[in-house]
Image (cartoon, grey):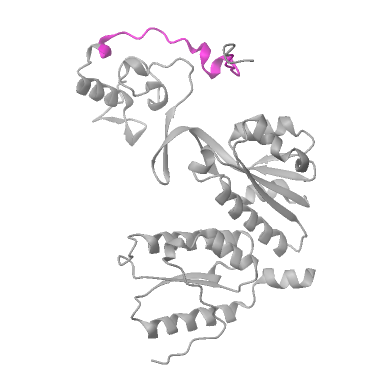
Amino acid sequence: MRLTYPTSIKIVRVPCTGKVDVIHMLRAFEKGADGVCVIGCMEGDCHFKAGNFRARKHVEQVQKILTTVGIEGERVKMYNLSSGEGPLFAKYANEIHEKIMELGPNPIKLKKKQAA
Amino acid sequence: MIVADKKPVEEIIEFIKEDKKILILGCNECVTVCEAGGKKEVGILASTLRMYFLNQGKDVKIDEITLERQCDHEYLEEIRDVADTYNAIVSLACGVGVQFMAEKYNSTPIYPGVNTCFLGATEHRGLWTERCQACGNCMLAITGGICPVSRCAKRILNGPCGGSSKGKCEINSELDCAWQLIIDRLKALDRLEDYEKICPIKDWSTDRAGGPRKVVREDVQI
């Protein structure tokens, strides 16, 4: 397929998106990530039954927490696709990249640099 | 177990917004089971607060510790050497833990990080319901193991009131009438004669109405 997606995206492989907990996403932002995108299997197709639903709930919780602390909740997003949908993965990767470019860098990262 | 619910982060921020070194203290018991104040929740709250203060341009140090229990001296002693080094401690234990902490470390302000709700059971993950009001005078033996004190809105002791309709309580159509449950259970046990027994006026002196209570057990005291 030789599809391209932005080099700004770093992939972290997990056995199931249900394993991605609230704290993992928060730590990513705390350490300076500009955005987090969770890509799970299609809803109803989870090998572990409800992992992707669990992930969606975790993503929603993180969105709320970020908004509370003054960071845009849109910096974290959940997508669903099947493993055969490479073009869709590239599309989502571009989409989240563009969204983050529009929002600018993570304000926490900037404040950390200023403090240093 | 004691069931607690998370306090809104905004409320916690309001308590500690002027402090420079804060400890978030979790408890490994009841609040861990009801997912309000265990190690995981301590991590989430600490991370949230760190990001909040960084975003405000404030240099605040936030540490995390989770004790086995906060309602026993020996576990609280584990933070004896560090407790005084903090400007504030946010305890994610139930109200008992928060108060015990405050009594033990009276020079450091202790703030509650959860709202303590009731004594209850886990129906399933994410749903906890009340089962006991600690009235101090248990009558479950004659009510088929279903408590009219905690599960009847009126705490009545001799059968349902006129508000019981189709097995539900008048205060909420989704709430089971405790007395309907008791009768059904006694019927299933073939113990309906227990229902006929008149329950005399309950001694409420063992309940909260008699002021703060204590249990003294000289047999186990050393």
Count of numbered circles on the image = 0
Can you give x and y, in whole percent of width and height, for residue A81 in the image?
Answer: 36, 75
| Left or right relative to B190: residue B109 | right
Q: Name the quadrant containing residue B96.
A: top right
Position above or below: B180 against A50: above
| Left or right relative to A87: residue B190 | left
Report the predominant secondary structure element of the magenta stretch: loop
Position above or below: A65 against B217: below
Which residue is at 77% across, 51% downward? B21
In this view, the residue farthest toward the front is B222
Which residue is at 42% across, 92% downward? A2
| Residue B211 covered by magenta stretch | yes
What segment carries the magenta color? B194-216
Which residue is at 33% across, 65% downward? A46
Position above or below: B167 against B111: above
In this view, the residue farthest toward the bottom is A2
Can you give x and y, in whole percent of width and height, for residue B145 in the image?
Answer: 33, 22
Can you give x and y, in whole percent of width and height, for residue A29 in the image?
Answer: 61, 67
Tell me if residue A71 can be seen. Answer: no
In this orientation, which residue lies closer to the viewer: B33 or B162? Answer: B33
| Residue B114 covered by magenta stretch | no
Tell me if residue B89 can be seen. Answer: yes
Can you give x and y, in whole percent of width and height, for residue B62 in the image?
Answer: 71, 53
| Left or right relative to A116: residue A7 | left
In this orientation, which residue lies closer to the viewer: B153 or B178? Answer: B178
| Left or right relative to B188: residue B45 | right
